[in-house]
Amino acid sequence: MFRMWAKIFKDNHLLKDTVICNEKEDTRTHKVFQALDEICYEFDLGKPIWLDATIAEFKRHAKARFTQDNFIEQVDFDYLEIHVIEED
C-alpha cells in the first residue's frame, strides 16, 4: 500500500490534513502524482508546479513543501506539505 499525508499550514498552525491511500500496482512516480491530484481536488487547489528545489527535497526526504511560488493562483496558506508515510 502507498500512503501520502498532506497538510496545509498557516502561521505555523495546521489548518487541514488528509491521507491518500493507493493500492494499485503502478510506479512510485504515478502514485505520487495521482495522490497529489486527489489532494488538490480534496483541498480545492490548483495543481502546484514542481520546482527543481521541490523535486530535490522530495527525492531526499520523501517529503516536499509547496509554497506560493509553486502555485499559479493566490493561496491563503503558507505552504502545502506532502509526505510519503508508507510504501509497498
Image (tube, helix red, strand yellow):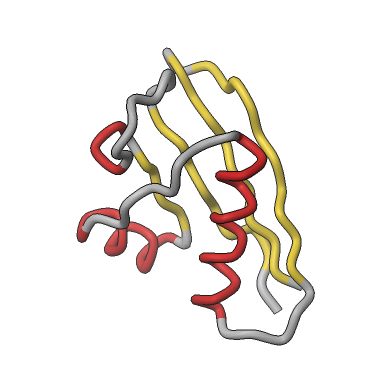
Residue 7 vs 77, above or below: the answer is below
State the residue at coordinates (33%, 32%): 73
Q: How many tags in the picture? A: 0
Residue 76 image point, x, y percent: 42, 18
Residue 30 image point, x, y percent: 54, 76
Q: Residue furthest left?
A: 52
Q: Which of these two is toward me, 57 or 6?
A: 6
Residue 60 vs 30, above or below: the answer is above
- Residue 26 picture quarter: bottom right
State the residue at coordinates (75%, 79%): 24
Residue 54 vs 2, above or below: the answer is above
State the residue at coordinates (68%, 65%): 86
In the picture, measured across the screen, residue 81 lies left or right of residue 1, that is left
Residue 18 image point, x, y percent: 70, 40
Q: Which of these two is toward me, 36 or 46?
A: 46
- Residue 46 picture quarter: top left
- Residue 14 picture quarter: top right
Q: Which of these two is toward me, 43 or 87?
A: 43
If the image is split into quadrants, where does the N terminus sit?
A: bottom right
In the picture, measured across the screen, residue 26 lies left or right of residue 9, that is right
If the image is split into quadrants, where does the C terminus sit?
A: bottom right
Q: Residue furthest top?
A: 11
State the residue at coordinates (47%, 62%): 62
Residue 10 image point, x, y percent: 45, 18
